[in-house]
Image (tube, helix red, strand yellow):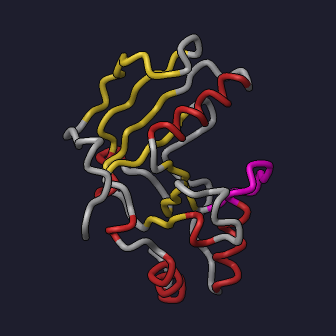
Amino acid sequence: MLSSTSNTIVARYECDGKDVPRVLWRVRYTGQSLKARAKPAFKTKQQFKRAVEMHLDWSNRIPTPFVTLFGTREHAVKWAKSHFELGYDDVFLLKINASKLGSIFQAHYLIQDPDFHNDEFLVLRKIPRRSIIRETYLSCAEGDSSEDSVGRSSEEASEEDDVFSG
């Protein structure tokens, strides 16, 4: 449970529902989890900002309380391809129902370079399994989904419905 100070900070920066796509995408590969590696422990806006900056710095190895998601399938597939190039061969694309997530933050609203992270979203703590619509293995030969779903699926959400309200 978050402290009242942390709750106030989260409430100030989290996305309004209308700013979040209905479906978000997560790339998962060896070493990646649905759960953040640290608990939220920020007591000031500066600590929150620092946690965001550390999370978005891909060379950072210090655990943060966030998990990254992408607003478009195309961006997620591009990210997955970069992991094939790094030698990963177990890359999965997760289609996520955003309405079943906790606090969501839009990265470009939180940092100084809004173009760099235009469709990246951060979720606080974890991606609940119940939010996964589909998990698809990506083939490095194709660099795209093999459409071989690995069986985790919940209700289908239309990819064309890209914004939810609430």
Q: 58 or 71: nearer the eye? A: 71
Question: To which quarter of the image does residue 107 belong?
Answer: bottom right
**Residue 126 percent across, percent down from the top left:** 46, 55
> 133 above or below 147?
below
| Tag count | 0
Compared across the picture, whether 10 is left or right of 37 comes to: left
Seen from this angle, which residue lies furthest left?
Answer: 155
Question: To which quarter of the image does residue 117 belong?
Answer: bottom right
> 45 above or below 103?
below
Residue in the image at 36% along x and 18% along y: 147
Seen from this angle, which residue lies furthest top?
Answer: 141
**Residue 146 percent across, percent down from the top left:** 42, 16
Q: Is residue 160 magenta?
A: no
Which span of residues is magenta-colored? Answer: 55-64
Residue in the image at 42% along x and 51% along y: 127
Q: 144 or 37: nearer the eye? A: 144
Residue in the image at 49% along x and 28% along y: 92
Q: Is residue 63 magenta?
A: yes
Q: Quadrant of the C terminus?
A: bottom left
> 41 above or below 69?
below
Q: Quadrant of the N terminus?
A: bottom left
**Residue 62 percent across, percent down from the top left:** 75, 57
Q: Assign the magenta stretch its main secondary structure.
A: loop
Residue in the image at 66% along x and 29% along y: 83
> 10 above or below 56?
below
